[in-house]
């Protein structure tokens, strides 16, 4: 009968060899730490400095059939400044399972306050592939996701109490802070 050591040594060697390529490793995550945080309304008003850059954005995300959009109820406009969100193939390995469950669309449209890290870009003017969206955001990592409404209507059609939670002002920031405090409290109680 083999000893436990003879079984564990090869396993440890495999883990050590794979560590640099495992999802979520420190080297892969480091590029996200330095991403500047940008307010969505400021981004829409002045997109040039962020073109093709990795940024962190705190906003509201709505997803439903054929909709994947970042918005802030303070500056949403049907005709300009809309941001389409696409998911990079690495987003799942860079995001916790709990947050992935909130964001994955399964016939249940949602409005979700989020902190996303990804690449922002303004496609060439008149690009027919963008539809009603002027900008695109490729998601690499979701850091926060809190459902604020169990449906995803256009921002003007949200109930008033939900609109205050999807504002880019203090309401959205305090919702994030409350959420982080709740999450930290839950983690400490476990």
Image (cartoon, rainbow, N blue to C red):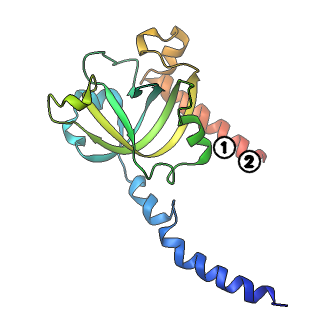
Furthest residue to the left?
125
The answer to whether 181 appears left or right of 28 in the picture is right
Residue 145, labelled with which disc? none
Q: Is residue 96 above or below residue 158?
A: below
User: Residue 188, labelled with which disc?
Assistant: 2
Q: Quadrant of residue 139?
A: top left
Q: Residues within 10 Å of mark 1 (few under 14, many from 20)?
A: few
Q: Which residue is mark 1?
A: 184
Say left or right for 113 vs 35.
right
Q: Pick the residue in front: 55 or 156.
A: 156
Nearer the observer, 170 or 116 = 116
Element marked by disc 1:
helix
Q: Residue at x 55, y 12 (%)?
A: 161
The x, y position of residue 170, in whole percent, is: 47, 24
* Numbered disc 2: secondary structure: helix
Dot 1 and dot 2 residues touching (CB under 8 Å) = yes
**Image quarter of the N terminus:** bottom right
Q: Position of residue 4 (x, y in %)?
A: 79, 85
Residue 23 x %, y %: 51, 61
Q: CA distance from mark 1 to mark 2?
A: 6 Å
Instruction: Look at the picture and state if 152 lies above or below 180.
Output: above
Q: Residue at coordinates 49% horizontally, 30% vertically from top-left?
A: 173
Task: Tell me: 36 left or right of 151.
Answer: left
Total marks in image: 2
């Amino acid at each position: 009968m083999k000893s436990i050591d003879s079984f564990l040594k090869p396993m440890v060697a495999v883990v050590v060899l794979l560590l640099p390529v495992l999802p979520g490793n420190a080297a892969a995550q480091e590029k996200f730490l330095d991403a500047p945080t940008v307010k969505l309304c400021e981004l829409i008003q002045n997109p040039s400095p962020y073109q093709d850059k990795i940024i962190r954005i705190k906003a509201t995300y709505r997803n439903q059939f054929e909709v994947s959009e970042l918005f802030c109820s303070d500056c949403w406009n049907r005709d300009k400044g809309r941001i389409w969100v696409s998911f990079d193939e690495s987003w799942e390995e860079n995001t916790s399972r709990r947050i992935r469950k909130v964001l994955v669309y399964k016939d249940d449209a949602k409005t979700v306050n989020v902190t996303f890290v990804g690449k922002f870009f303004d496609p060439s003017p008149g690009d027919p592939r963008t539809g009603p969206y002027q900008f695109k955001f490729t998601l690499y990592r979701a850091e926060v996701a809190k459902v604020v409404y169990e449906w995803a209507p256009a921002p003007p059609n949200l109930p008033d109490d939900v609109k205050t939670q999807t504002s880019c002002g203090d309401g959205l920031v305090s919702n994030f802070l409350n959420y982080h405090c709740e999450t930290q409290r839950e983690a400490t109680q476990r």
